[in-house]
Amino acid sequence: MVDLVEQLGLAQSTVSKHLACLRECGLVDSRPVGRASFFSLTRPSLLDVLVAAEVVLAETGSRVALCPAYGTPDGDTR
């Protein structure tokens, strides 16, 4: 997770919440490596989806909606 925090420039708690959402949705798996965790996609084909999303976001400049399971504190997922 440390690598993701550094690459994304986000707080560790934010990255942790996003990874929990991805795990709950079945998109990533994690395994312990010493005191750290190694995260990987559950299916190689998900990489194609991520590449497509990156292209769409680059074109539109739109933000991604929050994960329904981990939305804002008031329950708003927009």
Image (cartoon, grey):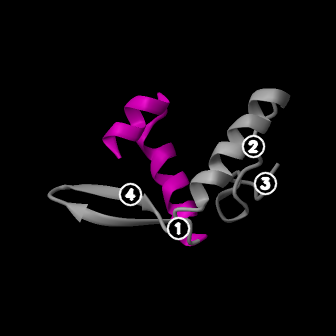
Percent coordinates x, y for residue 15 in the rendering: 48, 45
Taking the spot 17% from the left edge, 55% from the top edge, the residue there is 35
- Badge 1 element: loop
Of labels 3 and 1, earlier in sequence is 1
Of labels 2 and 3, earlier in sequence is 2
Which residues are drawn in magenta?
A: 1-25
Task: Calculate the distance from the C-alpha at mark 1 to the C-alpha at mark 4.
Answer: 12 Å
- Badge 4 element: strand
The disc placed on residue 39 is 4
Of labels 2 and 4, earlier in sequence is 4
Placement of 1 over or under 38, stated as above or below: above
- Badge 3 element: loop
Question: In the rendered image, is residue 61 in sight?
Answer: no
Residue 18 sits inside the magenta stretch: yes
Question: Which label sits in the foreground, 2 or 1?
Answer: 1
Taking the spot 51% from the left edge, 44% from the top edge, the residue there is 14
Percent coordinates x, y for residue 12 in the rendering: 41, 41
Instruction: For the residues labelled 2 and 4, say whether their Cβ atoms are less than 8 Å apart.
Output: no
75 horizontally vs 41: left or right: right
